[in-house]
Amino acid sequence: MILMEQRTLGRTGRDVSVVGQGTWQLGGDWGEVAEDDAFGLLDAAVASGVTFFDTADVYGDGRSEQLIGRYLKNPPDADVFVATKMGRRLDQVPENYVLDNFRTWNDRSRANLGTDTLDLVQLHCPPSTVYSSDAVYDALDTLVAEQRIAAYAVSVETCAEALTAIARPGVASVQIILNPFRLKPLDEVLPAAVAAGVGIIARVPLASGLLSGRYTKETVFGPDDHRTYNRHGEAFDQGETFSGIDYATGVAAAAEFAALAPEGATPAQTALRWIIQQPGVTSVIPGARSVEQARANAAAADLPPLPQSTLDAVRELYDRSIRAEVHDRW
């Protein structure tokens, strides 16, 4: 196994790898992934030094959690921290974020993952008012007291939601969209998290693959791929698909970003390296659909820090091509 840099995930007190493994794709919303392929890429990630898996109870209606649970039964030496999410199995209304529902959702996730106590449970981008509810945090504290979960956290859509959650003493970490096409969290969220001792998990790090530089305006995604059916927020928040950027705009900007990749690094690895070196980031969680992708993602942790000239070029590209579309909205 390859050793990778570990950072403490906020108030959990647990160390996780700076590159984790996102597993949304194992549920099928990026096209079908066969079970053997799923186990292969998880194994490749662990062998490459990954000690952090991120999933959710709605990824494939629990398939992602189930695959992780079965995988972790096999390699007894794999010390992997698993973060899951809850809150999207019912209508997205504040009234559904109550203790009885939390227990029901937790019971299902614990069964899927094959564990008595979940390492970390994140509220899965609930309505904004949920982040301010004392009753919600009281219920989460009860789950910890009942040893159903070891810690709790939030996954957010907006910076305002992140800042509200960071102010709560029991919130261990915040998961937020952060990549070279989504810079707003750098302004306030990351500094606030550092000051509070809250971890930051960076999701959608490649802007749904745009930052890999592999797509063109003519690329066609499958009908079961959210990059086909959610470009304008038809199924869930638009920001989850291409970071909320118009596809044609994103393809053009991605071509410019690809030119910034240092020798020996791919555009995707460059994007991951950019995220890793942002002050306050604990871990970045790219997805993967193959062994090769999992290994390549993990290898980004070994790249040297990007020079200031590259960081400046990323900011200039964002301000010129992306900011007007996404900054104020998210």
Image (cartoon, rainbow, N blue to C red):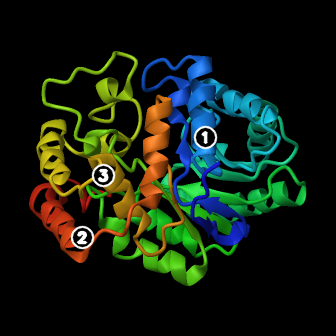
Nearer the observer, 169 or 205: 205
Q: Position of residue 94 (x, y in %)?
A: 59, 48
Determine which of the numbered discs, if any, sits on residue 311 in the image. Answer: 2
Q: Position of residue 15 (x, y in %)?
A: 68, 65
Residue at the far bottom: name it. Answer: 195
Q: Secondary structure at mark 3?
A: loop
Q: Is residue 130 visible?
A: no
Which-is-in-front pick, marks 1 and 2? Answer: 2
Q: Residues within 10 Å of mark 3 (few under 14, many from 20)?
A: some
Nearer the observer, 59 or 280: 280
* First of labels 2, 3 by sequence position: 3
The three-letter amino acid code for the residue at tag 2 is Leu
Mark 1 vs 2: CB contact within 8 A:
no
Q: Residues within 10 Å of mark 2 (few under 14, many from 20)?
A: some
Q: Which residue is at 16% across, 40% downward?
A: 251
The three-letter amino acid code for the residue at tag 3 is Ala
> To which residue does mark 1 refer?
55
Quarter holding the C terminus? bottom left
Q: Is residue 16 above or below residue 72?
A: below
Q: Is residue 69 above or below residue 79?
A: above
Q: Secondary structure at mark 2?
A: helix
Which-is-in-front pick, marks 1 and 3? Answer: 3
The mark tally for this picture is 3
Q: Position of residue 167 (x, y in %)?
A: 58, 76
> To which residue does mark 3 refer?
265
Q: Is residue 32 above or below residue 235?
A: above
Q: Which residue is at 80% across, 53% downward?
A: 149
Q: Residues within 10 Å of mark 1 (few under 14, many from 20)?
A: many
Q: Is residue 257 above or below residue 5?
A: above
Q: Position of residue 317 (x, y in %)?
A: 14, 61
* First of labels 1, 3 by sequence position: 1
Answer with left or right where residue 103 lies relative to residue 310: right
